[in-house]
Amino acid sequence: MLAVTKETFESEVLKSDKPVLADFNAGWCGPCKAMKPVLEELAAATPGVKFVSIDIDDQDELSDDYDVASIPCLVLFKGGEEVKRHVGLTSRDDIVALISE
Amino acid sequence: MHDIIVVGGGPAGMTAAIYARRASRSVLVLEAVACGGQILNTPDIENYPIEAHVSGYDFTTRVEAQARGLGAEFAFEKAVGLRRGGDAWVVETNKGGHRAKAVILATGAANRKLGLPDEDRLVGRGVSYCATCDGNFYRNKTVAVVGGGNTALEDALYLADLAEKVYLIHRRDGFRGEETNVARLRERPNVEFVLNATVSRLVAEKRLTAVEVTDVRDGSVRTIELRGLFVAVGRIPENQNFSSVIALDAAGYAIAGEDCHTAAPGVFVAGDNRVKPLRQLVTATADGAMAATEAVKFINEL
């Protein structure tokens, strides 16, 4: 999954021609790490959606901008706008439902 | 048909799978979300014998690998019911059903919610159930902790080091948690006790901005402006979907002794959803071992 920073957020997420699933996470967050293999598998299997990873410890401005106050937090962007989010440990089925929006 | 179905892929369930496989019984673990359960939220386990420091995530991945290496099968499905079907137990899930000779319910417990309007929507937008997970987002902000047990007191102490101000809201005058924790909180200049009060409303637009608390003695209402509300009002055992088969106590815990037997022959219960005096990683894994051993014994006697 592509790691996105404050500098690349606009080009990779807001101006993406595909929907983007942003995974706000941190290295110390167990549930985030538990979801990672599922996200990587879905990223490979879902070419129509771009999956990106945002480390909230390095990118606190992005977390502030998007009111992320609990992780894991998955945010789906379309055309530069947030359309849906899911907070907390999320099952594979629920992630599939989220990106099928 | 499997010999044993384990419902729940936390420490109790995965240990049960290990013991069942070592007794050469086929075993299917049904996990609703991801293996690990509550321990995934623990960054540093310091009280499990063999290693002074291991993260909940590392613990989980290693135990899962151990169970899979022994031949345990896993399916990511949510168990929604349990019934007899012919000479077997049938675990109904969101994707169908699975049959087994014996079932071990290791479903654990979930955070108890306040039950207020908008609470679910505000999780991650001001409402949290885990101070050590989310505390960092509230550095130099005003927060409140709700609850009167040790979790609430420890959360308040943890947050007092990070946040500008911590309100501790509790519906009674006294605390269930340890007096030493209460005394330590009283020494903190940035902690304010709001006693005999309950949170009656979450005030929010996009995110939480304040809470209304109601005094339980005179009904007066006070608004506290804050950024985060940490809810520590206990846990709810995840036994609701099986209450037609197993007996529960008033708090919802499965009634079973140390042998993990329920009143239903062939149905066992292991881990935090069982009645017990101490809910820890080590007691969860101990239950898993016991429940699997008893389940194997039950199958051998069929």
Image: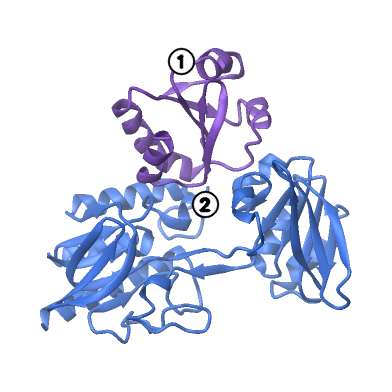
Q: Residue furthest bottom?
A: B263
- Secondary-structure class at tag 2: loop
Q: Which residue is mark 2?
A: B42
User: Which label lies toward us, 2 or 1?
Assistant: 1
The quarter holding residue B83 reads bottom left
Q: Is A5 situated left or right of B29 in this image? A: right
Q: Chain of mark 2?
A: B
Foreground of the two, B210 or A19: A19
Q: Is residue B98 above or below residue B216?
A: above
Foreground of the two, B94 or A38: B94
Q: Residues within 10 Å of mark 2 (few under 14, many from 20)?
A: some
Residue at 68% x, 31% y is A64
Answer whether residue A33 is visible to the viewer in this image.
Answer: yes
The quarter holding residue B67 reads bottom left
Q: Amino acid at mark 1?
A: Asp
Residue at 51% x, 55% y is B46
Q: Chain of mark 1?
A: A
Q: Is A100 situated left or right of B101 in this image? A: right
Q: Is residue B25 above or below residue A10?
A: below
Q: Are marks 2 and 1 in contact (CB under 8 Å)?
A: no
Q: Position of residue B79 (x, y in %)?
A: 32, 63
Q: Position of residue B51 (x, y in %)?
A: 43, 53
- Secondary-structure class at tag 1: loop
Foreground of the two, B157 or A1: A1
Q: Quadrant of the N terminus of chain B?
A: bottom left
Q: Residues within 10 Å of mark 1 (few under 14, many from 20)?
A: some
Q: Position of residue B186 (x, y in %)?
A: 84, 63
Q: Which residue is mark 1?
A: A17
Q: Which chain is blue?
A: B
Q: Are marks 2 and 1 on the same chain?
A: no
Figure colour of chain A: purple
Q: Position of residue B27 (x, y in %)?
A: 19, 62
